[in-house]
Amino acid sequence: MENNFGVTMNEYLPLRDVVFHTLRQAILRGELKPGERLMEIQLANKLGVSRTPIREAIRKLELEGLVLMIPRRGAEVAEITEKSLRDVLEVRKALEELAVQLACDKITEEQIEELKQAARVFEELLDSGDITRVAEADVSFHDIIYMATDNQRLIQLLNNLREQMYRYRTEYLKKRESHGRLLKEHQELIEMIEKRDKIKASEITCLHIDNQVEAVTGMIRTNESAK
């Protein structure tokens, strides 16, 4: 386990949360690679903490789908598989299609302006090379649509799914050839929501997710054939 990540203490967060976010970012950035075993003692020594917050963090990462518990082997970073990708994004498509339809009915002018501003921030960050910040900007864009639904149960379901989607979102955003298409889809989605056109907004949302599935599936197949 020769990685360069380390823990950064935060006086406002419990240690278990700091450790969790540290390991989560290491997985999403690829510093902890798919298939790599997560040895509690080694991680505890590396981060300068006890094994308890490491164990708690691994449990939370398992719930997010970022870690797998293998019988007689222990915890390891989950592989990005085509099946897991499709499972997550099929659910996302259904929920986001409902969200955008509700948003067309309920979004306020203020929220439309927030959506336009979020799209501008996303565009500005795309060329930065900081995938974490770009992914956060993309999340912020979609969060405005979720909040516009004014449906707390739907927002909760989407937020629960968001962590499982995050890994696929970052992989997609790494593909620079997809950036132009992403910007176009964001702008078209804003336009259709502003026009309250549920049918077109739904179509763009589904296309937006299908393109992500296609791109990340291609990456997975390329990686598998290289093994």
Image (cartoon, helix red, strand yellow):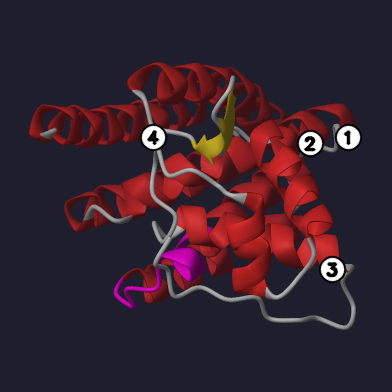
**Which numbered disc covers residue 208?**
4
What is the CA distance from the residue labelled 2 to the residue labelled 3?
A: 28 Å
Q: Amino acid at mark 2?
A: Ile
Q: CB under 8 Å between callouts 3 and 1?
A: no
Residue 195 can be seen, yes or no: no
Q: CB under 8 Å between callouts 2 and 1?
A: yes
What is the CA distance from the residue labelled 3 to the residue labelled 1?
A: 30 Å
- Between 2 and 145, the one lying in front of the other is 2
User: Where does residue 116 sit, x and y in percent of width and height?
Assistant: 54, 63
Sequence order check, earlier mark of 2 and 3: 3
Q: Amino acid at mark 1?
A: Gln
Residue 16 can be seen, yes or no: yes
Q: Amino acid at mark 4?
A: His
Task: Check disc 3 and report the residue beneath it.
Answer: 15
Q: Amino acid at mark 3?
A: Leu
Q: Residues within 10 Å of mark 4 (few under 14, many from 20)?
A: some
Task: Check disc 1 and report the residue beneath it.
Answer: 152
Query: Residue drawn 26% across and 28% down?
Result: 217
Sequence order check, earlier mark of 4 and 1: 1
User: Where does residue 70 sit, x and y in percent of width and height?
Assistant: 56, 24
Task: Check disc 2 and report the residue beneath it.
Answer: 155
Label 3 SS: helix
What is the CA distance from the residue labelled 2 to the residue labelled 4?
A: 19 Å
Sequence order check, earlier mark of 3 and 1: 3
Sequence order check, earlier mark of 3 and 4: 3
